[in-house]
Image (tube, helix red, strand yellow):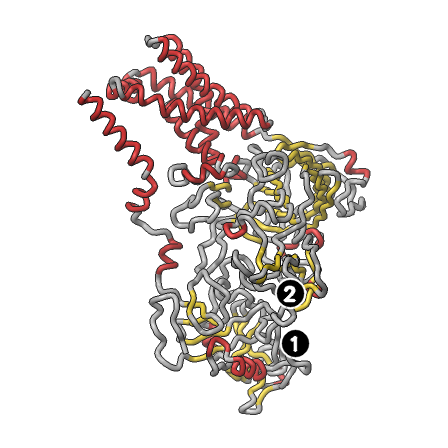
Amino acid sequence: MVGGCVLIQLLSGFRIASQQRDFWLYFDWLLPQGLVHIWHVISGVLLLVSLPIMLFTLLNQRKESVVLKTFNQIGSLIICVSVVSGGGQFFLELSHTVVRLTHYYSAVGLLAFIALHPLRYYFQKPLGHIYQIVIAPFSYKKSYLYLGAIALVSASLYLVTLAHPKTLEAKAIADNVFIKIDGKDDETDWYHASEVFVDTFAGANFYSGMSKVSMKVLHNATETYFFIRWQDPTESLLHLPLVKTEKGWRVKGRGFSRFDEKQYYEDKLALLFSKSCSIAAAATAHLGNQPRSELPANKHKKGYHFSSHGVVDLWQWKAVRTNAMYLVDDSYIGKPVPPVIGEKRYTAGYQQDGDMGGSYILNWKWYNSESVVPKRLPLAPSHDAQGYVSWFDYKAYSPELDNLPVGSLIKSVLYRSNQIEGGRADVRAFGRYSNGYWNLEIVRKKKAAEETDIDLSNGICLWVSAFDHAQTAHTRHVKPLRLIYKL
Amino acid sequence: MHILIKKLLALAAVVLISTEFGTLYQAFKSAPSLFETADSREYRFVKLNQQGQAISNEQGPWHCVFDRELNVIWLVGRDDESPFDSYWSYSWFDREQGKGVQQRGSCYFNKNGCDTSLIQQQAIERNVCNVTHWRLPHADELIALLQTPTKPNGPFIQSAFFPHIQKGDYWSQTQSHDIDTQALTHLKEGAVAVSFKHGTSRVLPFRNAAHTMLVADIKEKAPTVSGKYIEIK
């Protein structure tokens, strides 16, 4: 069982590592796909529970040479380090870089140990060893008892841990208290709201991919207010700018063609709400190139978000595309939609709520990584490509009017109107960057307005992810927060 | 020694197979995915570029779509402020019959306003997709384009091939006296318009502003799309 768990741990662990370390994408064909976070945690808990028994057996019953005994002891030590550092992340929510690096490198060490481990047996008596490890334990009646006990303890530990996530208390305010959505928590009630901190990690950029997020919540009879503050070393408003080259216009990007831009992109923040408190973002994070055989493969090989049961509400605030509209982009994660032929990007269950128009649009007619034709051009030469531009501040593109010099940078985000309309605009928000932090204030009615939203009710779970000028590479945390309304 | 060599050879075989696991998997993978199946079959729509050449489903830009089912070419609305921008609206007017209401729609290329004959004239003059016989579609042709939206509140059309479709009414050339809206029945005559917002059709009076998507018949038998580049004239 330990061997099986270690194997699941390693394969699922390197799949999880591939979210941040592209090297492991070379082994995409080998690594498991789907809800690997859940498999990783379950096998980790089983390993944690069974580890003391295994170590006791190893250290007391083996009659081996000193060299082999030392070799096995090193392997056991690596497993211990790996399991303890992983357990610390799951049970205690430790996310310090040292803990995560220890976990990662102990897994790499374990991989080396396993690679050497069978070689030794192979050149001795391979069948005898396989019998000893795989078959013999099943001939002892007590083995089943031990296995059952380990499974029971592990399942209890797993379920009890998940049943008690950290709570985020929403402080009640009177209906006549006015909270201005301006990215400032200067209203008196915010000072009295309890603040919860979440260490998010494994994103692109930030501080080694990490960002500490703080959250406060207020509520009245009909609405819930959120104030979210997160670390971000840079205010990134340069969103896929267009640069003029000798050969024409080109979109600046390093990864946009595979939907994994990590440099020329705006900052973002995502909040995910679900009635389910399961790990892996309410069991919506399906990792891998093609987590289900009936779905098309994704270009970045990182995976898809989709839900097998019900709708998960997803709010995505975008520093350029929605902030000046005082909105977050109200989206959701549902069942994977059928692929549509000719569609440029397939996003499985991640979809935006329906809108009635008024959205932002991108300033190119057809995207090609080599060259594009802009939709609109600035009225005067400009090198400031940060932020968005109003439709009417640029003029319609035509080759005759395109006399901007080579090297000119223009904006890619065009606001065609002041606001998005419809269900996609159900959540109001405004973010403000100051001294290394984004400060974001959000409000939405408690009652869901669309089928693709969920009620903000007592006991729902939420997750938060930050993006530092990255398209999809966001930070994450293992266990959710539970929203509790104080009356 | 002999046994050791055998074991080394067996080990090398195991390493080789395990490192080539992905290749073997691809070779023995039997059931193609839904996406692969859908993509490889002869699909209803084919993108045509400005010159009328067929391009693959993933390529762009395209200005027209060849519809295998109806054996027609659709002029695809754009988002480029050209006369074919799908944002513009038109009143219904037939120049040959002298019927309808002129220039009551909103567009930028004619200061006095636009009607369906004007956009038809523009498409013919500009030889869009190498086609010069553009016309307004019949109501049943437009209705044949309706399909269930793939996303909530999405348009009732294959939006990957018609990406800038407006959530509003589109004119057909089919005339009718059955104006649905009670307040407008005094206008007596109009034409059938199809809404890609609701997936329904209704009769609107000629003076109404609605969007337009022109269509052209395939004059000769359309060639089979076997390669990436064919010409449909």
In the image: residue B115, left or right of residue B219? right
Tag of residue A444: none
Residue A5 % position (x, y): 40, 26
User: Type of residue at label 1?
Assistant: Tyr
- Mark 1 crowd level (few <14, some 14–19, many ≥20, 10 Å Cα): few
The foreground one among A43 and B203 is A43
The structure residue drawn at horizontal position 63% and vertical position 55%, both measured from the top left corner, is A241
Mark 2 secondary-structure assignment: strand
SS class, disc 1: loop
**Residue A465 quadrant:** top right
Residue B178 appears in the rendering: no
Dot 2: chain letter:
A
Quadrant in which the C terminus of chain B is drawn: bottom left
Could you say which is closer to the camera, residue B153 or residue A395? A395
What residue is shown at x 30% (from left), y 42% (from top)? B24
The residue identified by callout 2 is A376
Give residue B108's mark: 1
Query: Which chain's residue wears label 1?
Result: B
Q: Looking at the picture, how far across and down is residue B140, in whole percent?
A: 46, 76
A92 with respect to B11 (left or right): right
> A304 above or below A79?
below
Q: Examine the rendering and report whether any part of residue A391 can be seen.
A: yes
The residue drawn where x is 52% and y is 56% is A369
